[in-house]
Amino acid sequence: MELYLVVFAVAFFITLFITPLVIRLAYRIGALDMPSQRKVHRKVMPRFGGPAVYCGFLAIAAYLLHLEYDPQVAGLLIGGTFILLLGAIDDIYSLPPLAKLLGQVAAAVLVVLFGVRVNFITNPFDGYFELGMMSIPVTIFWIVAVTNSINLIDGLDGLAAGISTIALLTISLIGLRTQSSMPVVLLSLGLAGAILGFLRYNFYPAKIFLGDSGSMFLGFTIAVLSTMGLLKMVTVYTFVIPVIILGVPIFDTSFAILRRYSRGKPIFAADKRHIHHRLLNRGLTHRQAVLALYCLAIAFGLSAVYLVNRIY
């Protein structure tokens, strides 16, 4: 238990102290989010939170690799660094959607090359299906899908960061319950600690946004950690559990894609019809909408823990 607390605290304090420096850096390099009709904020905001969260996570990942080299942890670190740099470029220069998508696929391919793969899908009636070579496209699809889900839910102060923290703590609890990969548990706790350090400046009223550097890094890392841990369980709930944990961003993204497709609009086209926008339109304040979605994410997380407890 002491190790878990140390990992969490180290990542928390590193990000807590680095974030003010990152805020100043964002203003200097022009990583700024301008107000617009489709956005909720009404003033220029720095959108460069990724490097702050990354520093806290990097300390934990580097420590684990120092203790014992794990190719999957190394792949996560390399792929995560790539996705962070991709998001940082977008925060400064605003890349086109296709360029970001191709970059996300490239980052997913990197971790696959280091052995991070979904090797099977459980058959709920009997046994499971070995994916064989299909494991590569399935893994890439999962990583890219979760990366974009967290990216798209990042529409209110502290929303994506808080939901990511809840998901990571759930992954940690399930990892401890099932005695799965210890690096997955420690990395999940470390990233959760880093995000909470960042939330000190990101919760409403925010002083800095995650930006694409932060939201894509969080989504990518959560997707890879779930592949390394949750998707290795040979149970009827192999794919159900991580989908439940990430229920809020996954369902919101799925509805957004269907909504845009049915209206004949590009699926990457931004709109103000996400679940958080709808809550604001219902009369909830900014803070109330975020807290309501936190509660929904916690409910999803507890449901996943309950299902795991029924199995083990």
Image: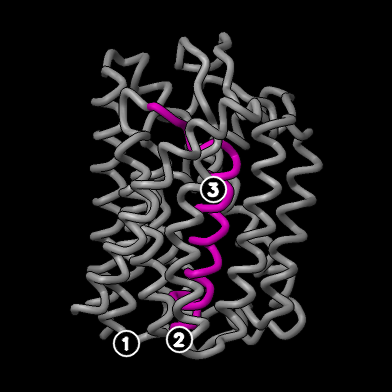
Mark 1 vs mark 3: in front: 3
Disc 2 crowd, CA 10 A, few/some/many (<14, 14-19, 20+) = some
Q: Where the N terminus falls, by quadrant?
A: bottom left
Q: Is residue 283 above or below residue 23?
A: above
Q: Earlier in the sequence, mark 2 or mark 3?
A: 3
Q: Residue at x 46, y 16 (%)?
A: 40
Question: Residue most toward the left?
Answer: 1
Disc 3 crowd, CA 10 A, few/some/many (<14, 14-19, 20+) = many
Helix, strand or loop at label 3? It is helix
Task: Inspect this view and state whether residue 23 appears.
Answer: yes
Disc 2 from disc 3: Cα separation: 36 Å
Q: Which residues are magenta?
A: 207-233
Question: Dividing the picture into quarters, in which one does residue 47 lie?
Answer: top right
> What is the three-letter code of the residue carrying label 2?
Val
Q: Is residue 271 magenta?
A: no
Looking at the picture, how far across and down is residue 3, in whole percent? Answer: 25, 79
Q: Is residue 145 above or below residue 221?
A: above
Q: Tell me: 197 left or right of 239.
A: left
Disc 1 from disc 2: Cα separation: 14 Å
Q: Return the residue at label 2.
A: 234
Q: Is residue 232 magenta?
A: yes
Looking at the picture, how far across and down is residue 126, in whole percent? Answer: 48, 88
Q: Return the residue at label 1.
A: 179
Question: Dividing the picture into quarters, in which one does residue 141 lie?
Answer: bottom right
Looking at the picture, how far across and down is residue 248, in whole percent? Answer: 40, 45
The disc label shown at residue 272, or none: none
Q: Return the residue at label 3.
A: 51
> What is the three-letter code of the residue carrying label 1?
Gln
Helix, strand or loop at label 2? It is loop
> What is the three-letter code of the residue carrying label 3?
Pro
Q: Residue at x 55, y 67 (%)?
A: 224
| Along the viewing direction, whichever of 203 and 170 lies nearer the viewer | 203
